[in-house]
Amino acid sequence: MKRLEKSVIELTAKLDAITSELSKSKQDVTIEKTQNHASKGIL
């Protein structure tokens, strides 16, 4: 039971890390899109 509990905790930590990476990359894409639109507006 302890082993299973430890595995669940480790998996949860990994999932949290993946989730935060995904949200970071989504923000990066949003920033890129915003910059592209801004530069197109200037041209």
Image: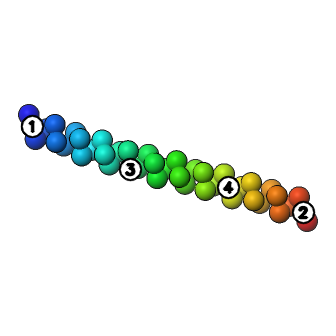
Hey, what amino acid is under mark 2?
Ile
Q: CA distance from mark 1 to mark 3?
A: 23 Å
Q: Most extreme residue toward the right, as rendered?
A: 43
Q: CA distance from mark 4 to mark 3?
A: 21 Å
Q: Earlier in the sequence, mark 1 or mark 3?
A: 1
Q: Earlier in the sequence, mark 4 or mark 1?
A: 1
Q: Earlier in the sequence, mark 1 or mark 2?
A: 1
Horizontal relation, residue 41 to residue 20: left or right: right
Instruction: Assess disc 4: are there few (<14), some (14-19) or many (≥20) residues with their C-alpha within 10 Å of its C-alpha.
Output: few
Residue placed under numbered mark 4 in the picture: 31
At 83% across and 63% down in the image, what residue appears? Answer: 39
Q: Which mark is residue 42?
A: 2
Q: Earlier in the sequence, mark 2 or mark 4?
A: 4
Circles 2 and 4, Cβ within 8 Å, touching? The answer is no
At 85% across and 61% down in the image, what residue appears? Answer: 40
Circles 1 and 3, Cβ within 8 Å, touching? The answer is no
Hey, what amino acid is under mark 1?
Lys
Hey, what amino acid is under mark 3?
Ala
- Rendered location of residue 10, percent (x, y): 24, 46
- Rendered location of residue 38, percent (x, y): 82, 58
As helix, strand or loop, the secondary structure at mark 4 comes to helix
Please, is residue 33 above or below residue 1 in the view? below
Instruction: Assess disc 1: are there few (<14), some (14-19) or many (≥20) residues with their C-alpha within 10 Å of its C-alpha.
Output: few
Residue placed under numbered mark 3 in the picture: 17
Instruction: Assess disc 2: are there few (<14), some (14-19) or many (≥20) residues with their C-alpha within 10 Å of its C-alpha.
Output: few
As helix, strand or loop, the secondary structure at mark 1 comes to helix
